[in-house]
Image (spheres, helix red, strand yellow):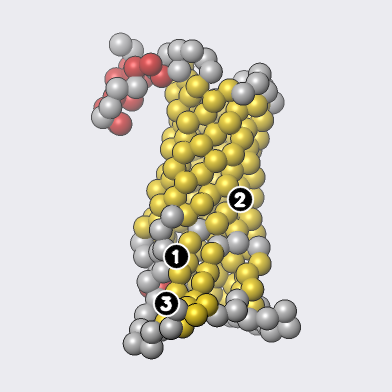
């Protein structure tokens, strides 16, 4: 067993020997388009809220473990990523923004569909670093306390391979946890639900 295989077993504490034939390190970054799910219920009746897409970005590093069959691979990433949404009460009301920044760890299974395309699916774990709301004048308020620290969800997408080093991917993040922690509505039978809904457009470079 070579040094790379030993490091993999130590880091992940489960057998990845079938993926140890080829290990690639890379970096990635790109655009996020988020339209996070925000729902507010008063006495179980939903309030009318219009949500719009909020742009952000992501960047970070990855490790890819290629299986001996050369068709499947396992990829682990660590990313700084942003998500959020723009909210209006109606089409004519002023908008305000919710921005949430996280450290996320996506865990992906990649399957080679064709020579140039990979299908990807998996899960992600997120830790919220900060959150803020901006009013129509651009004034920001720290709202980190309105959110749980952790996020979790599923993801799927595809990857276009330009060559052995460069690739582009598109990925949809579907949060499963309601990570709202707001106490604004406590005591008046109102519930707030907030879940991650983000599309990532990324560029990947492997060394």
Q: Residues under labels 3 and 2: Cα distance?
A: 26 Å
Q: Secondary structure at mark 2?
A: strand
Does label 2 or label 1 sit earlier along the sequence? Answer: 1
Q: Which residue is mark 1?
A: 130
Going 34% across and 22% down the picture, which residue do you hit?
Answer: 16
Q: Position of residue 49 (x, y in %)?
A: 60, 76
Residue 140 is left or right of residue 2, and the answer is right
- Determine the image quadrant of residue 135: bottom right
State the CA–CA distance, disc 2 to disc 1: 20 Å
Could you tell me which residue is drawn at 64 percent across and 59 percent down? 55
Question: Which tag is nearer the camera, tag 3 or tag 2?
Answer: 3
- Residue receiving disc 2: 199
Disc 3 target residue: 191
Circle nearer the viewer, 2 or 1: 2
Is 142 placed above or below 152 here? below
Are the residues at dot 1 and dot 3 in contact (C-beta closer than 8 Å)?
A: no
Task: Tell whether 47 sits left or right of 17.
Answer: right
Residue 200 visible in image? yes
Locate residue 121, reporting x and y percent.
51, 37
Nearer-the-camera pick, 204 or 51: 51
């Amino acid at each position: 067993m070579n040094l790379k295989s030993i490091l993999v077993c130590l880091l992940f504490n489960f057998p990845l020997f079938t993926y140890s034939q080829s290990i690639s390190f890379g970096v990635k970054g790109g655009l996020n388009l988020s339209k996070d799910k925000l729902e507010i219920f008063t006495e179980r009746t939903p309030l009318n809220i219009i949500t719009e897409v909020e742009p952000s970005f992501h960047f970070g590093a990855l490790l890819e473990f290629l299986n001996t069959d050369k068709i499947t691979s396992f990829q682990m990433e660590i990313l700084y990523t942003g998500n959020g949404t723009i909210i209006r009460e109606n089409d004519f009301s002023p908008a305000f923004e919710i921005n949430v920044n996280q450290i996320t760890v996506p865990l992906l299974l990649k399957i080679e569909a064709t020579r140039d395309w990979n299908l990807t699916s998996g899960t992600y774990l997120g830790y919220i670093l900060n959150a803020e709301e901006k009013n129509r004048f651009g004034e920001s308020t720290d709202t980190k306390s309105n959110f749980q620290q952790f996020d979790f969800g599923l993801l799927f997408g595809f990857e276009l391979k330009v060559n052995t080093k460069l690739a582009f991917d598109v990925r949809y993040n579907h949060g499963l946890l309601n990570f709202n922690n707001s106490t604004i509505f406590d005591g008046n039978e109102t519930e707030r639900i907030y879940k991650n809904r983000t599309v990532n457009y990324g560029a990947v470079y492997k060394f």
